[in-house]
Image (cartoon, grey):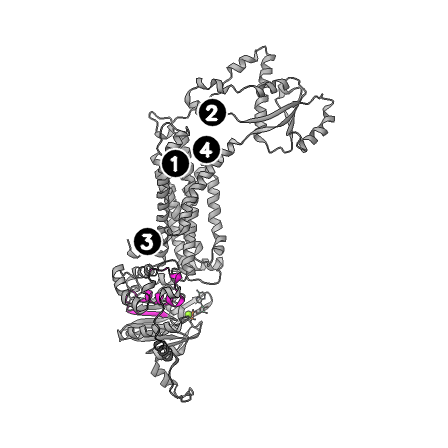
Amino acid sequence: MEAAISLSGVTKTFGKFTAVSSLELTVPKGLTFGLLGPNGAGKTTTIRMIMNITKPDSGSIRVLGQEMNEELQQRIGYLPEERGLYRKMKVVDQLLFLAEIKGVDRDTAMRRLGPWLDSMDLRPWINKKTEELSKGMQQKVQFLGTIVHDPEILILDEPFSGLDPINVILIKDFLSEFKKQGKTIVFSTHVMEYAEKLCDRIALLYRSKKLLDGTVREIKNLYRDRVPLPPPVEPEPELEKIFIKAVEESGLTAPSPEELR
Amino acid sequence: MNPKLIAIIKREYLQQIRTKAFWISTFLIPSIGLGMVFLQVAMSKTLVAKGKIGVVDLSGRLYDGLVAEYNKPTKDSTEKEKQPRLTQEKQKPPLATRMEFFKIEATKESLPGLRKKLNDDVQKEQIKAYIVLDENILENGVAEWRAQSVKADLVLRETVANLLSRVATKERLKDRGVDPEIYEKARMRIEIDPHEAKEVETESSKNAGFNLAVSGVFFFLIYISIFVYGAFIMRGVLEEKNNRIVEVLVSSVKPVHLMLGKIIGIGFVGLTQYAVWGVLASFMSLPAFAAMMGMADGVPSIPFLTIAAFVVFFLLGYFLYAALYAAVAAPFNTEQEAQQFVMVPAMILILASTTWFFAFNTPNGAVAVTLSFFPLTSPLLMFMRISVQPPPFWQIGVSIVLLLLAIWGMAWLAGRIYRVGILMYGKKPTVPEIFRWIREAD
Ligand SMILES: Nc1ncnc2c1ncn2[C@@H]1O[C@H](COP(=O)(O)OP(=O)(O)O)[C@@H](O)[C@H]1O
Ligand SMILES: [Mg+2]
């Protein structure tokens, strides 16, 4: 299987502090890859180096077999951990601008955005300034900005942190949709539960080093004898599904801008 | 050009000209400029020599003449018509005076006893000052002036000195058997009518007054716009950092393009502002206005060289300081944090602006020449020199080359600081840390 992303011997220090140390990592094409680890493990630093935002001290990084370049940037959708939007810009201008700097012309971008704007209930808001939108709405706009150029690879740094529950579901759905389309997804998280549900492969970082790497199944087998199994649980409905059901049953539709004002 | 760079420039431009800050500065800057000019004119009109002045005339030769001289109607009004036009314009209007002289009876012997009372009167502001004219004043030419301060009242002192000089001259003529009236009639002042030493004079020498005003206005414009647009750049960089969009941006475009896009975009904002001012000025027909003020013959035009120098040095100065401001802003999170570092280039700029008089009075003097080569000051000083008296072309060339080199170096440096700095949130970095980024960012 061809690698979408490969790192070999990648090290990054900040002064005396080593944030990433001799990291070897391969993300195969078409899979969903989880970069796990507690805060400070080096996930963000690793991702920034993949994006060529931070330069590694040593080692080599390849994406789709190439060093990072402008053409490659256009094939990647990146949602940084530190994210935000221009507050004073209109939603539509903002999205078109984000498309433009990914090399997508405005017409194509507008055409592509259409169905998403509808399915995310953003249509009535597109001519509002971003700062007038609710936090949840802004999160949707941000995510749209990440995918507006229809990237082959999605790199998301802590995509679920700070999201409201509806948006967590929304993004999970998007991710499984992308996966079906054969796109490669890399995301970092310190919440193991998300990783377990979404990932084909995971790597565990801890204090700048990689401790584990493999498919979820492989890793589980490896530790089967050494980690106590959880007590068997009665199957019960997940809270998430309950939430969706409750919304459906309420018969209410998504709020319009006028209502939210 | 790179389409992404164009997208950045376009966004920057459109966003900026929609802000209140843009429109406020568009109308505020010319108002401040005009305000300063009017203030100067108004202030020069309020310069009045006034006050009650006691005169101790130990020589007994000057007091009566002084009072007579002071109360004499100014002869300028009667003689004006006879004078050629040019000198008329150049002549300063007579200063408004409101002085009152009174005689203090004293002798050499009684004076020391009187001084305490006189000094008291001065301190209590009963009188403005008193002068002591000793017996030998017609030989030694010095009058003692006693006032609260030896620094203040320059104009008043100068006026009194002029009056006394005239009276003393007449007295000395009398001593030599000449009728002072002859002096009164023969006295004249020669005005200098400046021309260029050329067969065919350029337009600029004919409208010296107007051109001087234009140079001043342009000089002020370069100076203030570098400040204003530098602040725009700084605020823009901090805004992208604070609303956390910058990392999204640098995953799509090179940080250096991001910086460049911002600088060029705001540069166009500046040009737009100038266009607005241009339209406003032609509406108010500034040149015609200037002509009416009697500064020039007919409706003058601004010399091409001045305009060219303005455009070139404004742009170069803008790019240099813009890169500097971008570099200074990038490591910080708030304007307050960045402000301390902005102080350094700002001080240099302010200092440069205060030296305009050197460039104006002695465009080829050591101060003006040195500063017109130093890149942080040359945009202002070289422009001033060119507009007053074009220096040799090699000097202009060297100045431009040095500026370009400085811009290149500054952009390189700023690019490195920018690249690392825009991702630094929270903690305020120290100067050694910033230097480490410059070394490490490759
Ligand atoms: N620019 C930087 N300067 C200094 N230290 C940094 C910098 N970026 C990250 N670090 C440090 O590197 C370590 C790893 O950070 P990070 O990659 O953000 O971890 P994670 O994303 O896994 O939480 C942290 O201890 C962090 O403080
Ligand atoms: Mg992180």
Is residue B151 or residue B419 the one in the foreground?
B151
Q: How many marks?
A: 4
Q: Residues within 10 Å of mark 2 (few under 14, many from 20)?
A: few
Q: Which residue is mark 3?
A: B10
**Three-letter code, disc 1:** Ile
Which contiguous range is marked in magenta? A127-156
Which chain contains the residue that carries disc 3?
B
Q: Give me the disc on residue B91.
A: 2
Q: Quadrant of ligand 2?
A: bottom left
Judge whether residue A210 is colored magenta: no
* Of callouts 1 and 2, the N-terminal one: 2
Q: Are marks 1 and 2 on the same chain?
A: yes
**Between marks 1 and 4, how big is the CA–CA gap?**
13 Å
Q: Is residue A143 magenta?
A: yes
Lower sequence index among marks 1 and 3: 3
Q: Disc 4 vs disc 3: which is toward the camera? A: 3
Q: Secondary structure at mark 4?
A: helix
